[in-house]
């Protein structure tokens, strides 16, 4: 084939093709990136489950330590030390993970903590993370990966410290940092280079979460080994006695009485034989649950026995007797200041139910609102409602609600106040007393026990002198200067009328009665 000379343009296109081919070879496919994201999410969920499982083991450990501190105490102290070093190791790995994301994304540590891996834009990049983990070294000895390796080795030493050889033999330690690692060409690599050299951020984060899971698994194995090292028989049955733990000693008719019946120190591997009034009660995890329908009211009693296998294999029987009280629900809903509800004002109400704590009482109303203020309830009903019902229920705090009944109330309009001036609603009034008062005051009826005031917004002043009628208007509750002069010039026996008195209350404006005055 004859050779030919390439043009500059052809050379440029050929070079760009080579570059693109190289980039494609280096680029990680989108499917692989997404696979890392999915695996990482699974690892994060696994880590939470592992921590929750370990926390449950610690809780059981602590309870057993309280039962017999002399026996369990040394094991419990070691378990707490394992928890401390494990939490410190996990916290260190978490910080490494957030630092890697922070550097790769160019964001703060706090932002990195709150950014899911799927939302990290540089999850397919490796330049910044390689520099972070490997550093300026050929084997990673000057990067973060070497520091991480040393931390892992120290953690393995610390977590096994103080354990017997037999205990160590039962623990699957894992977290290997020395292995036969090889690169793609078959050349030998150390742990740092194998896991972090030219590894994309998504793979780094997933691997670090995998390390956290390994730490939690080691923690789980060590604590379980410590827990199993204790002789259950020595401390679980140190003091044995029958116990009956009812949910409540008082039950309402129609409800169910429930109680836990158990040996004081429970052996969950042994289900005791429980018999009550000749009836065998099945047990699970060392506890028998006794339930019976609350029928007739009054004091109810029951008795029985618990049989368990003792430390030496002999059967021991522990009798018990218990009682509870059944009563019919009763309800009290009473207004504290009146025998009806008044519209558009706060009506204080007392609500109580026999045997029910105030915190477990809920109330509702068919119209308006009802709310708790301190230890009292407050009802507010709108205008136009003639009757309301207050319903009360009992919430036992365990998701169960019981209807306690309801109470009906009439709704009345707030009574209209009476207009007073000079402390009188009409009749003879001394001129000097009338001039000194200067204002109309609305007064509520004496049997209306509410802190409620109406406001006089206007009234008409009418006076007659020498056959002439004087008609004056005030847009407040006070006498105007013209009204005051008229009174000053009035003679004994002269009549004055204050009428069209308008007052503003909680439900709008009211027209009050006329005040008829004879000047004295």
Image (cartoon, grey):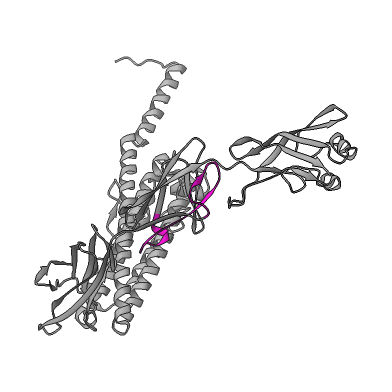
Residue 510 is left or right of residue 478, and the answer is left
Left or right: 440 with respect to 128?
Answer: right
> Can you give x and y, in whole percent of width and height, for residue 66 in the image?
33, 78
- Locate residue 472, reporting x and y percent: 81, 30
Q: What span is in magenta?
A: 337-361
Name above or below for residue 246 compared with residue 377.
below
Of residues 28 and 255, which is closer to you in this image?
Answer: 255
Q: Quadrant of residue 224?
A: bottom left
| Residue for point 33% across, 76% down | 76
> Residue pushed farthest front?
493
User: Residue sitting at 22 percent across and 77 percent down?
Assistant: 166
On the question of residue 501 being in view, the answer is yes
Residue occupying the point 24% across, 83% down: 239
Q: Quadrant of residue 10?
A: top left
Report the label total.
0
Q: Is residue 158 visible?
A: no
Please tell me whether residue 434 belongs to the stretch shown in magenta: no
In the shown orientation, is residue 128 left or right of residue 462?
Answer: left
Please identify the quadrant where the C terminus is shown: top right
Location of the N terminus by quadrant is top left
Whole-percent x, y for residue 397 in the image: 35, 58
Figure check: 7 above or below 149: above
Vertical side of 507 occupied by 306: above or below: below
- Residue 424 image point, x, y percent: 73, 47
Q: Nearer the viewer, residue 56 or 29?
A: 56
Depth check: 352 or 453 in front?
A: 453
């Amino acid at each position: 084939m004859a050779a030919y000379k390439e043009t500059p343009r052809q050379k440029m296109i050929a070079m760009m093709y080579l570059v693109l081919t190289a980039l494609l070879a280096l680029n990680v496919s989108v499917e692989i990136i997404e696979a890392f994201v999915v695996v990482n999410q699974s690892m994060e969920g696994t880590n939470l489950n592992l921590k929750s499982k370990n926390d449950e083991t610690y809780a059981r450990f602590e309870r057993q330590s309280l039962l017999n501190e002399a026996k369990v105490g040394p094991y419990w102290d070691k378990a707490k030390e394992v928890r401390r070093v494990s939490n410190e190791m996990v916290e260190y790995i978490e910080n490494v993970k957030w630092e890697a994301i922070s550097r790769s994304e160019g964001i703060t540590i706090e932002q990195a903590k709150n950014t899911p891996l799927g939302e990290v834009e540089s999850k397919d990049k490796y330049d910044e993370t390689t520099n972070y983990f490997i550093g300026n070294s050929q084997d990673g000895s000057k990067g973060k990966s070497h520091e991480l390796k040393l931390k892992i080795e120290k953690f393995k030493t610390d977590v096994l410290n103080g354990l017997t050889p037999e205990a160590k033999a039962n623990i699957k330690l894992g977290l290997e940092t020395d292995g036969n690692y090889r690169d793609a060409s078959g050349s030998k690599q150390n742990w740092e280079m194998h896991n972090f050299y030219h590894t994309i951020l998504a793979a780094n984060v997933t691997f670090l979460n995998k390390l956290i899971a390994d730490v939690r698994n080691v923690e789980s194995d060590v604590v379980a080994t410590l827990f199993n090292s204790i002789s259950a028989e020595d401390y679980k049955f140190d003091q044995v006695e029958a116990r009956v733990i009812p949910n409540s000693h008082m039950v309402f008719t129609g409800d169910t009485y429930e109680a836990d019946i158990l040996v004081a120190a429970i052996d969950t591997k042994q289900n005791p034989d429980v018999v009550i009034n000749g009836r065998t009660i099945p047990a699970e995890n060392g506890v028998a649950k006794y339930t019976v329908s609350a029928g007739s009211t009054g004091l109810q009693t029951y008795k029985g026995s618990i049989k368990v296998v003792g430390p030496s294999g002999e059967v021991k029987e522990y009798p018990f007797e218990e009682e509870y009280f059944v009563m019919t629900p009763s309800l009290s809903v009473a207004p504290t200041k009146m025998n009806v509800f008044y519209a558009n004002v706060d009506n204080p109400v007392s609500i109580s139910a026999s045997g029910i704590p105030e915190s477990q009482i809920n109330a509702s109303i068919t119209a308006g609102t009802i709310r708790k203020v301190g230890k009292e309830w407050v009802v507010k009903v709108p205008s136009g409602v003639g009757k309301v019902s207050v319903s009360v229920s009992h919430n036992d705090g365990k998701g169960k609600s019981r209807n306690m009944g309801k109470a009906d109330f009439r709704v009345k309009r707030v009574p209209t106040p009476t207009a007073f001036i000079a402390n009188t609603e009409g009749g003879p009034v001394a001129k000097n007393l009338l001039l000194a008062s200067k204002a109309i005051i609305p007064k509520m009826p004496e049997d209306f026990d509410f802190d409620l005031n109406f406001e006089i917004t206007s009234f008409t002043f009418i006076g007659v002198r020498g056959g002439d009628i004087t008609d004056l208007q005030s847009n407040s509750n006070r006498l105007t200067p013209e009204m005051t002069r008229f009174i000053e010039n009035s003679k004994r026996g002269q009549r004055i009328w204050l009428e069209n008195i308008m007052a503003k209350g909680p439900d709008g404006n009211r027209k009050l009665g006329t005040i008829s005055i004879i000047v004295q």
